[in-house]
Image: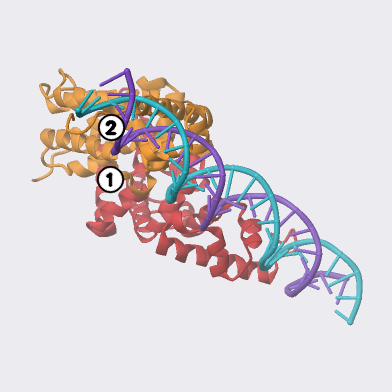
Chain colours: A red, B orange, C purple, D cyan
DNA sequence: AGGGCAAGCGGACTGTCAGTCCGGTTATGG
DNA sequence: CCATAACCGGACTGACAGTCCGCTTGCCCT
């Protein structure tokens, strides 16, 4: 990272201000009603600055979710059990889905925005790809006879913002987590198929 | 229906022209790049006409999917087995998912547009609600011990446009249908829980 | 047949927004 | 303290959703 001149202090400050403003506005008014003009104004910067840093509207939203998902990503690749690689796949899967449920429940507004922003190509969004690869790998380890790719998508589809909103409204993150894990369990315990 | 003066002939003609134009353009260019100006022009009508008939952009898309889903809806409530009410729930569920897979595969572009158009409140879209009620009922009949509502959402989530596109690209509607039915099977055969 | 009229039509108009561009500003390394 | 490259901001453009209202036309009644 020290390859190139380090990022200017004001640039860092502005990036943070923009992300923070975007998150606040998103939570308050929803994706549809947040224009980048407003984000820029709320962050106290010019519109050009927002576009230069994040490319476009969708880039901003993606950056938002990525930042929020970073900690989880690290816990998964190098953290302790049950998330980390030292636990058995079934346990890791449950732990991961649980963590995801928590993340989703605490950031519904952002998740909704992300769904909209990446709708064009949801399945190739970097964050989605990372999560999917992880889930797919775990399923494959636990049950090599199953179509892990497909079941990976099935499980992640449960974290659709609208669904998360509805489920957590009636029972909080715990309810979401329980339901998701129940489905994962049903998949991992489904009748064996010939390989 | 004869309560009020019947719909004027030109109105009918225009409605059809608009729906047809919208579908064509959607398939050709994708939701993002189809403006209602263009739809109106392609249908050979004025912009005002489009808005009067369908309320707004989303209304048009919703109407499009509803029209396409009508036949399935009727087959389900009053048709013959395996879709209709004379078959046992497990069979009806498989048949319904199969029909849905077919519908989805043959109308991906429209489905994608619908996903976008209803993103604000996907779970309350009339078509979604109808499908969900049906699936939920069937699951509830087959397995009263399960959270049918939740599993209903899980199954319908598989018909997300992006996922449908990817799966059918690599194996057609049959592959999608098989995968979905496999998941349904895993759910219906999951270990009993105390009621 | 044809007159009256509500239903229907269409396109000009408005307000908003994503994204571009470039002249001015400022942090940073020497 | 200077040179400079990175950064900033907001005016500008083009496109689009949705509104509005004067004009047209199919339909019903006599």
Which quadrant holds residue B132?
A: top left
Image quadrant where one finds the C terminus of chain A: top left
Neighbourhood count class around disc 2 (C-alpha, 10 Å): few under 14, some 14–19, many 20 upward: many
CA distance for labels 2 and 1: 24 Å
In this view, the mark in front (2 or 1): 1
SS at mark 2 in the image: helix
Q: Position of residue D19 (x, y in %)?
A: 43, 51
Q: To which chain does the residue with label 1 belong?
A: B
One can see residue A92 in this view: no
For the residues beneath circles 2 and 1, the answer to whether they share a chain is yes
Q: Is residue A177 left or right of residue A27?
A: left
Q: To which chain does the residue with label 2 belong?
A: B
One can see residue B125 in this view: yes
Q: Vertical placement of A69 versus B35: above or below?
A: below
Marker disc for residue B124? 1
Looking at the image, is mark 2 or mark 1 earlier in the sequence? 1
Work out whether residue A121 or residue B32 is closer to the camera in this orientation and state it: B32
Which quadrant holds residue B109?
A: top left
Image quadrant where one finds the N terminus of chain A: bottom right
Q: Position of residue D15 (x, y in %)?
A: 59, 42
Residue annotated with mark 2: B183
Q: Position of residue B56 (x, y in %)?
A: 40, 43
Q: Vertical placement of A179 versus A109: above or below?
A: above
């Amino acid at each position: 990272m020290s390859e190139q001149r380090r990022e200017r202090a004001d640039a860092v400050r502005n990036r943070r201000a923009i992300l923070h403003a975007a998150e606040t506005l998103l939570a308050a008014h929803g994706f549809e009603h947040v224009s980048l003009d407003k984000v820029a104004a709320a962050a106290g910067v010019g519109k050009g600055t927002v576009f230069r840093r994040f490319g476009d509207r969708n880039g901003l939203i993606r950056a938002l979710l990525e930042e929020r998902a970073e900690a989880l990503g690290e816990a998964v690749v190098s953290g302790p059990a049950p998330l980390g690689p030292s636990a058995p796949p079934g346990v890791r899967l449950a732990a991961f889905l649980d963590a995801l449920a928590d993340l989703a429940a605490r950031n519904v507004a952002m998740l909704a925005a992300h769904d909209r922003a990446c709708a064009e190509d949801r399945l190739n969004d970097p964050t989605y790809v990372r999560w999917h690869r992880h889930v797919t790998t775990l399923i494959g380890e636990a049950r090599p006879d199953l179509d892990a790719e497909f079941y990976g998508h099935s499980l992640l589809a449960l974290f659709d913002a609208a669904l998360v909103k509805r489920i957590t409204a009636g029972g909080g993150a715990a309810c979401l987590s329980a339901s998701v894990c129940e489905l994962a369990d049903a998949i991992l315990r489904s009748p064996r198929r010939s390989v």
